[in-house]
Amino acid sequence: MTERAQVEPPHPADSVLDHVGYRLKKAHAALRGAMDQALRAHGLTVPQYACLEVLAARPGLSNAELARATFVTRQSMNVVLRGLQDSGLLTRPDVAETGRARPATLTDEGEGRLRAAQADVYAIEARMIRTVPDGRLAALLDDLDRIAGALNP
């Protein structure tokens, strides 16, 4: 049997449960679970909701741009867009004017569904924010951006 060298964690940790990555994943899983439950009442999934949010802010984005903005693959975004289009929540041209991009825009029904879902999603975010001590939210957001930047070259 081969002996393996002991690798030290990057910060003091008694177990994997104390690692930053584990705690980030735990927070993400809690957020995702709360959002899944809230969005189910609106007939939406988290990727669908994210797509509606991004399109409300930046109408006309392509499949690839939406995929990047919502952290899913292009193939997954294609499924999301098809579902939203079939539900009457967004429109896309049948054929691309140039290239392959078919820009998406929200319908009135899509905007209404988004606004209704936002109330529940924003309430979840407010619950999270209430747990952050006064004056520390900006620092937390900066820290999260730096963490993401360290992992995305």
Image: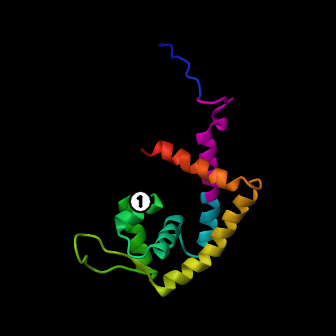
| Residue located at (43% from left, 69% from top) | 80
Residue 5, x across and y down, in percent: 52, 16
Residue 143 in the figure: left or right of residue 109: right
Mark 1: amino acid: Arg
Residue reaching furthest bottom? 108
Residue 13 in the figure: left or right of residue 46: right
| Residue located at (51% from left, 67% from top) | 50
The image quadrant of residue 131 is bottom right
Q: Examine the structure image and report whether residue 26 is included in the region drawn in magenta.
A: yes
Above or below — where is 38 with respect to 110? above
Residue 101, x across and y down, in percent: 29, 70
Residue 26, x across and y down, in percent: 63, 48
Above or below — where is 120 with respect to 138? below
The colour scheme used here is rainbow
Residue stretch rendered in magenta on the structure: 10-31
Q: Which residue is mark 1?
A: 68
Above or below — where is 83 with respect to 68? below
Residue 108 in the figure: left or right of residue 31: left
Relative depth, front residue between 84 and 9: 9
Q: Examine the structure image and report whether residue 118 is included in the region drawn in magenta.
A: no
| Residue located at (34% from left, 75% from top) | 103
The image quadrant of residue 123 is bottom right
The image quadrant of residue 78 is bottom left
Question: Quadrant where the C terminus lies?
Answer: top left
Q: Secondary structure at mark 1?
A: helix
Local packing at callout 1 (Cα closer than 10 Å; few below 14, some 14-19, many 20+) is: few
Relative depth, front residue between 55 and 140: 140
Residue 129, x across and y down, in percent: 71, 59
Residue 59 in the figure: left or right of residue 121: left
Q: Main secondary structure of the magenta part?
A: helix
